[in-house]
Image (cartoon, rainbow, N blue to C red):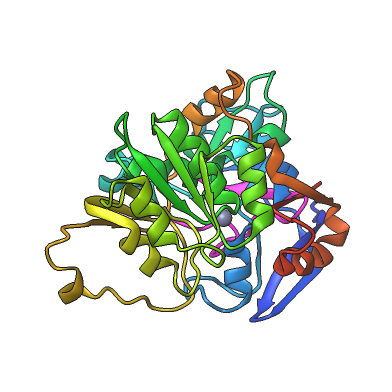
Amino acid sequence: MCYTLYMKALVYKDTGKIELVERPMPVLQSDRDAIVKVEVSSICTSDLHILRGFVPRANKNTVLGHEFVGEIVSVANAVKNLKPGDRVSANCETFCGECWFCKRGFVNNCEKGGWELGCRIDGCHAEYVRVPYADTGLTKLPDNVSYENALFVGDILSSGWWGAELCEIKNDDLIAIIGAGPVGLCSMLSARLLGASKIIAIDIDETRLEIAKKQNLADYFINPEKSDLCGVIKDLTGGRGVDSVIEAAGGKNTFELAYKIARPNAIVAVVAMYEENQILPLPEMYGKNLIFKTGGVDASKCSELVKLISENKINTDFLITHRYKLDDIVEAYKFFDTKSDGCLKIAVV
Ligand SMILES: [Zn+2]
Ligand SMILES: [Zn+2]
């Protein structure tokens, strides 16, 4: 006898339109697949970007969501390191681990993957999800790491870590991080661990600066709407500018701010996702010799990040400010979009 089981899933119907529907349970499709029971997931700003129609590669009628943790229920025969019952965190990127890009750690540009889950194939805002290339896309959690402890490993923590790594931090570096949202905050804690001597947190949202202060993630806290950012940075750096900048805000003028506060020969790491083109005034900045690094996270350090969490060197629990049930996920999306009530991240359980 053959029958189909159904589950609840949040589907991206069209620009501005999502719906919680019944969907057939995912099944193993190729020999490196795993099926994961989603225990906790989160909503990412990238999900909102899809919903607003700003992600051309997104497929309609796809289950959204790419940030989650859960338990493996089945694995296909070529999956070697995982078995049913394993607790795992998921990578936001799907990658084969074998192609030219993967071998060099550039997994975002995997020839067979990239941002697939919740974009081109069904994602995690459902009860179950199929994860392709499970052995590269899932990281086993040690017993002392809870699901919520590891919720952000594969996406925003990876993004923050990657942004900090792009800066090639040296021990006496002063790093400015624009945007004290979830990725910016993760960049701050990563920059600290990677050896930055001082960190400047920049945001126009006082609540977020407060969080950075309370979590001891930065040393200076600047709201550019309230003080002269360039002036303060000049004072702090003997007029030079900061040694590197992580732009994690993606606001209307934050790209411009990023290269303005950088000292000559600094690295400007652009981790933010913009909804419009940005202007790079090359004649004006000629001779400043900046190094720009841009893009989508190469989330290839998940095992290291899980290890750091397990050793209590990283803790991202403070990012979970709100909790919703999967049944109420449409409501959760609406609320997340308002960024109100001090919301940083929502855990969907
Ligand atoms: Zn994301
Ligand atoms: Zn690959």
Q: Quadrant of residue 8?
A: bottom right
Q: Position of residue 206 (x, y in %)?
A: 65, 57
Residue at the image position 48 percent from the left and 66 percent from the top: 250
The reply to whether residue 223 is visible in this rendering is yes
Q: Is residue 145 above or below residue 271?
A: above
Does the stretch in magenta take in 113? yes
**Which residue range is magenta in the image?**
112-133
Q: Is residue 86 above or below residue 5?
A: above
Q: Residue furthest left?
A: 287
Q: Position of residue 141 (x, y in %)?
A: 63, 26
**Chief secondary structure of the magenta portion:** loop
Residue at the image position 76 percent from the left and 64 percent from the top: 340
Q: Position of residue 108 (x, y in %)?
A: 39, 52
Asked whether, in this view, residue 120 is left or right of residue 259, the answer is: right
Does the stretch in magenta take in 322? no
Q: Position of residue 99 (x, y in %)?
A: 30, 45
Q: Is residue 199 above or below residue 170?
A: below
Q: Residue furthest bottom?
A: 15
Q: Closer to the camera, 304 or 292?
A: 292
Q: Closer to the camera, 178 or 80?
A: 178
Q: Quadrant of residue 140?
A: top right
